[in-house]
């Protein structure tokens, strides 16, 4: 449903997308949760318009949540009420980006429709509104429907460091297209040394600053380079991308804002890795 077209009606529509009605507040918030098998979408709607409230109370119109998912071709309208503001959707119906619109729709013909605060251009006119017409609409919202939850509690949840198969390998390689984890491949001698040192707690800060920091920095640059469409595809294909995005959201970090955003974000995610490495050096008397 293209909401901009949907609210272009011969009758006034209460929506923040136009000045048909003043005040034009019709604000909705969503809370989206999942138990891996189902989506639970709870709607919180706020508006003040006596006429629209009267139509709702009389049953002449109803509130609903309209959902569209391009990837699964799902499209559905779910009626809302004070007693039922939560919508439950089977998990398989939604995947990827979902557009959600909260609207008020006429349930029957209203022969003399008028709404409080309608624009002076409408004068004191009333309108014949048929069933199924949009009377109010909140601004469209979007959410990502991805049925797994793996925030980065430990870097090991998104990163695997492996040993090169060939003895001839001399440079570190990365695989950013593995669906489960980012794969870092070390030359054999480097990997053996890494395995030897990684369990030494006195070197933990140095391992983070020398090994993990450059890897996470490269990962963030990769994510920042993706277009919106490519990022959506990457989130669907790669669990580690979703984990990184959730961590960035949790920390309030934007990879496209400010100076050196990836460099700053890598430090936030790894909790000041450079300082931790310097402190290890200091403790070792180096």
Image: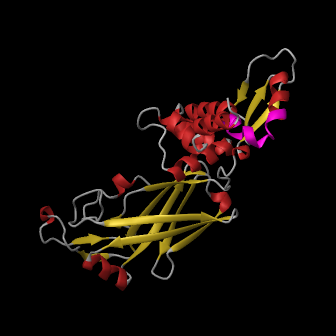
User: What residue is at 36 percent from the left and 71 percent from the top?
Assistant: 46
Q: Nearer the viewer, residue 55 or 257?
A: 257
Q: Which residues are magenta?
A: 196-208
Name, please, the residue furthest toward the front: 285
164 on left or right of 65: right
Position of the C terminus by quadrant:
top right
- Image coords of residue 189 (percent x, y): 84, 22
Q: How many marks?
A: 0
Q: Quadrant of residue 223?
A: top right
Q: Quadrant of residue 118?
A: bottom left
223 on left or right of 158: left
Is 107 placed above or below 284 here?
below
Is 83 placed above or below 216 here?
below
- Our reading of the magenta stretch's main secondary structure is helix
Is 109 placed above or below 100 here?
below
202 on left or right of 13: right
Residue 227 shows in this picture: no
Q: Quadrant of residue 267?
A: top right
- Image coords of residue 232 (percent x, y): 57, 42
Position of the N terminus by quadrant:
bottom left
Q: Nearer the viewer, residue 104 or 236?
A: 236
Please say whether residue 201 is one of the residues in the magenta stretch.
yes
Residue 208 shows in this picture: yes
Please say whether residue 16 is one of the residues in the magenta stretch.
no
- Image coords of residue 160 (percent x, y): 76, 38
6 on left or right of 79: left
- Image coords of residue 240 (percent x, y): 67, 43
Name, please, the residue furthest toward the top: 168
Is 164 placed above or below 106 here?
above
User: What residue is at 63 percent from the left and 48 percent from the top?
Assistant: 243
């Amino acid at each position: 449903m293209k909401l901009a077209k949907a609210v272009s009606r011969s009758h006034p529509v209460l929506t923040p997308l136009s000045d048909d009605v003043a005040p034009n507040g019709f604000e909705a918030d969503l809370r989206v949760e999942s138990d891996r098998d189902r989506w639970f979408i709870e709607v919180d709607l706020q508006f003040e318009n006596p006429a629209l409230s009267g139509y709702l109370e009389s049953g002449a119109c109803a509130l609903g949540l309209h959902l569209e998912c391009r990837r699964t071709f799902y499209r559905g309208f779910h009626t809302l009420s004070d007693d039922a503001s939560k919508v439950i959707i089977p998990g398989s119906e939604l995947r990827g980006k979902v557009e959600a619109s909260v609207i008020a729709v006429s349930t029957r013909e209203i022969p003399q429709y008028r709404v409080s605060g309608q624009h002076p251009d409408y004068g004191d006119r009333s309108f014949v509104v048929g069933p199924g017409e949009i009377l109010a609409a909140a601004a469209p919202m979007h959410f990502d429907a991805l049925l797994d939850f793996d925030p980065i509690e430990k870097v090991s949840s998104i990163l695997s460091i492996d040993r090169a198969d060939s003895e001839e390998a001399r440079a570190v390689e990365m695989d950013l297209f593995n669906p489960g984890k980012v794969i870092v491949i070390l030359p054999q001698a480097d990997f053996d040394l890494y395995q030897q040192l990684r369990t030494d707690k006195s070197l933990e800060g140095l391992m983070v600053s020398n090994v993990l920091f450059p890897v996470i920095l490269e990962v963030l640059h990769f994510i920042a380079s993706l277009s919106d469409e490519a990022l959506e595809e990457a989130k669907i294909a790669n669990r580690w991308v979703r984990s990184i995005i959730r961590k960035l959201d949790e920390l309030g970090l934007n990879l496209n804002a400010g100076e050196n955003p990836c460099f700053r974000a890598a430090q936030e995610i790894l909790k000041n890795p450079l300082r931790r490495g310097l402190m290890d050096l200091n403790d070792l008397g180096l």
